[in-house]
Image (cartoon, rainbow, N blue to C red):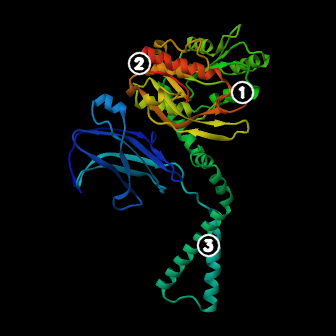
Amino acid sequence: MKNINVPFTFRIESPLASYFDNQAALIISGWLHTENIKINSINIYIESSSYKIRKKIGCLTYGYKRLDVFEAYKKNLFCGFFGNIYLYQDTPVTLKLWAAADGADQFFISDLYLEPLRLKSFNLILYLNFFRLSFNIFFSKLFSGQLPRDPKVFLLKFINFKRRFFSNSSNSNSNSNSNSNSKYLSNPYLGWRHKNSLTLNLIKRMNKISTELEKKGPLISIVVPVFNPKVEHLKAMINSVLDQIYSNWELILVDDASKNFRTDEIIHEYARNDSRIKFISNEVNRHISITTNRGISFSNGSFIAFLDHDDLLSKDALFHFIRALKERPNLEWLYSDEDKIDDKGKHFDPIFKGDWSAEAAICHNYTHHLTLVKKTTLNKVRGLTEGLEGAQDLDLNLKLAEIVEISNIAHIPFVCYHWRAHSESTASDGLQKDYIFDAAKKSISNAFERRKLKAEVFLP
C-alpha cells in the first residue's frame, strides 16, 4: 500500500481510558473527517514486546452516520467508525490506526497506547506439580536407561511434555467451568456482565484517576424525588451514591410528603453521617415535577443528575461522565446505557443506546437513565413541566433538544444505571401507570407546536 499525506480531523471516543481487558473485547469507535478522500476502512496494527514486527490485527467499519460532525463541518455525514478487537496480551501495546482509502492508498491517523487490565494469573501449584512430575519421569528414565543421549532429542521431548501437561491442565479447567459457562447461554447478558464487571485492579486505577479529576472536576448534584419508597430500596439507592468512585457530588433528597415516617428517619440518619447529603421535605404532596424542580433549586452543582428513589447507580457511573466532560468541556447533556434489576438483584433487559438521534427522541424517552444536564441549560427550559407527570422526563428531553447543539450531547457507552423493576414501577412493563401515555402524547404535541410542525400524535 502507498502512504499518502491527507489533511484530516478525528476523535477517538472509545476506549475512554488507556487500558484494556485481555479477557474481553475492546471497542474502538470515533469519527474521521477528511476533504475529498473516500475512506473504506480503518486498519489496526499492533506493536508490543511480543511482536518484533508490526502486525495487522483487525479493521474498523467506516461510514456510520454522525450528525454532530456533519453539523460542525457541513459535509461528510457518514464519517463514524466502530469495531472491536481482542488483545490477548499481558504487556502494554501500541495500536496504530491507519485509514485505507480508495486504491492502495493509506494514511496514518493516530497511536493508541494501552496497558493490560488483567494479567494472566500465575498458578504456583500447577507449576510445582509440573516440576515434581518432570523430576519423577527424569529419574525413572535415567535409572531404566531410557533417557535420550542426544541433548537435542531430550530438549525436544521435554518441550512436548510441557505442552501436553499445560494443555491438559487448561482443558481440565475449561471442563470444570463448563457449568458456569452454560448458564450464560440462557442469559447472554449475565455473561456480558461477567466479562465486563469491575475488578479490584480496575477500581484501583479508577480511584487514582478520580483523585486527579476531583481537583478540577465539577460538583454533581444528584436530585432524587422521594415518595413512599420501600425502606430497603431507599437505603440501596443512597448506598449506591455513597459508593461512587468519583466523590465530588451532593445528594439532594426531596420527600414529597411520604406517609411512612421511617422515610424521614432514614434520610436524616444518612444526612447526619455525610454532609454531602441534603434533605428537603414538602409539607403536602406536590408530585414529581415540582418536587424535582425544588431539589434543583437547592443544588450547588454545575451539573444535575436525575435518580429515582428506588433505582441504583453503578459504582463507576459518575466517573465515566466526568471523564467525558474532561475530554469534551463543551458538553451540556450526557446520557448512559442502563439495565433493569429485580428485588433479587438479577440484572436484565439492558438498553445499549446509540449516539443522539433527533428522530428517535421525538417518539420516546430516548436518553432515559442516567441523564446529566448542565444546570444553566436546565434553567433555560425551566426544569420539569408541571402537569405532565409520568412523562416529565420525555418532555424535558424534547425541550432540551430544541436548545442544545448536537455537538454538545454525548452518549456514555457504559451501563451506569440500574432501573428497579417491581410491581408498581414502569420498569416492569410500562402498563402500571395508564396516565403516562396521555402525558407522553401531550408532551410530543407540545413539542410539535413549539417547532411549528403539523403532525398528529398517536399510540401504535
Is 18 on the left or on the right of 160, as rendered?
A: left
> Which residue is under mark 2?
453
What's the residue type where badge 1 is placed?
Answer: Glu
Closest to the camera, between mark 3 and mark 1, is 1
Does the image show residue 455? yes
Is 279 on the left or on the right of 318, as rendered?
A: right
Q: Residue 166: horizontal and vertical position, in percent? A: 58, 70
Q: Earlier in the sequence, mark 2 or mark 1?
A: 1
Mark count = 3
| Quarter of the picture holding the N terminus | bottom left
Q: Residue at x 56, y 14 (%)?
A: 296
> Which residue is under mark 3?
131
Q: Residue 141: horizontal and vertical position, in percent? A: 61, 87
Q: CA distance from mark 3 to mark 1?
A: 61 Å
Q: Residue 10: horizontal and vertical position, in percent? A: 32, 38
Does the image show residue 276? no
Q: Residue at x 65, y 33 (%)?
A: 429
